[in-house]
Image (spheres, grey):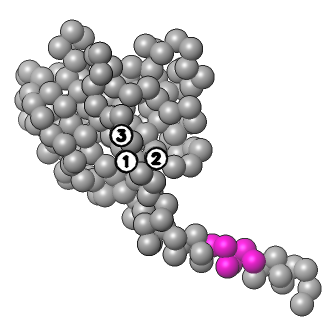
Amino acid sequence: MSVLKWLVVGFVALVLISLLAGRLGLLQGKPPSNLGVRDGRLKPPAKTPNSVSSQALLYPDHPRRDFAQIEPLPIKGDGPATLARLRRIVEALPGAQVVKSEPDYLYAQFTTPLMRFVDDVEFWFDPAAGRVQVRSASRVGHGDRGLNRARVEDIRTRLAEAP
């Protein structure tokens, strides 16, 4: 066989192996053990360009601080009512699974349909700021092609439209 045919066969094999690994859940990564609120902060953004955080500016030496920065979500009513709305919004999104829901904190996982990648998303009612702080990050990989930012902005739009 020519070199080109071997390259094509190798590429097809690599794609099939990757798809199989994804379908078997081998690309999900492990849930972070340090999620939640500590000292009035969510976990810092990832050091790779695959996360966003409304608290990124609290980490001035972080290499992705400016890239990761996103605005917090506004309150509709009070904090617990806003978190309840967010829970309903998140539960209606494809691939979402609410893992933890408290009056002031919501943690959900989003799984992509094809490769089964998992993103961890947190919402925290910050009473001092009067806003909902948010962090969304991919567990594995380097980039996310803007998916975490787009997801948070979609949730922001849905929250603004929610009764």
**Which of labels 1 and 2 is toward the front?**
1
Q: Which amino acid type is shown beneath numbered disc 2?
A: Arg
Asked whether residue 79 is in view, the answer is yes
Q: Which residue is mark 1?
A: 31
97 shown above or below 56: below
- What numbered label is drawn on residue 106? none
Q: Give yes or no for contact between labels 3 and 2 (Cβ–Cβ under 8 Å).
A: no
Q: Tag 3: Cα neighbours inside 10 Å, few (<14), some, or many (≥20)?
A: few
- What numbered label is drawn on residue 33? 3
Q: Which amino acid type is shown beneath numbered disc 1?
A: Pro
Figure label count:
3
Coordinates of residue 52 in the picture (x, y in percent):
44, 31
Mark 3 to mark 2: distance in Å?
12 Å
Residue with the most extreme bottom position: 1
Q: Tag 2: Cα neighbours inside 10 Å, few (<14), some, or many (≥20)?
A: some
* In this picture, residue 48 sits left or right of residue 72: right
Coordinates of residue 79 in the picture (x, y in percent):
12, 23
Residue 148 versus residue 33: which sits nearer the camera? 33
Residue with the most extreme front position: 33
Q: Which residue: 44% across, 58% down?
A: 28
Q: Which residue: 68% across, 78% down?
A: 12
Which secondary structure dominates the residues rendered in magenta? helix
Q: Which residue is mark 2?
A: 139
Q: Which amino acid type is shown beneath numbered disc 3?
A: Ser
Q: Give yes or no for contact between labels 1 and 2 (Cβ–Cβ under 8 Å).
A: yes
Q: Which residues are magenta?
A: 10-15
68 shown above or below 143: above
Which one is earlier in the sequence, the residue at label 1 or at label 2?
A: 1
Q: Is residue 151 magenta?
A: no
Mark 3 element type: loop
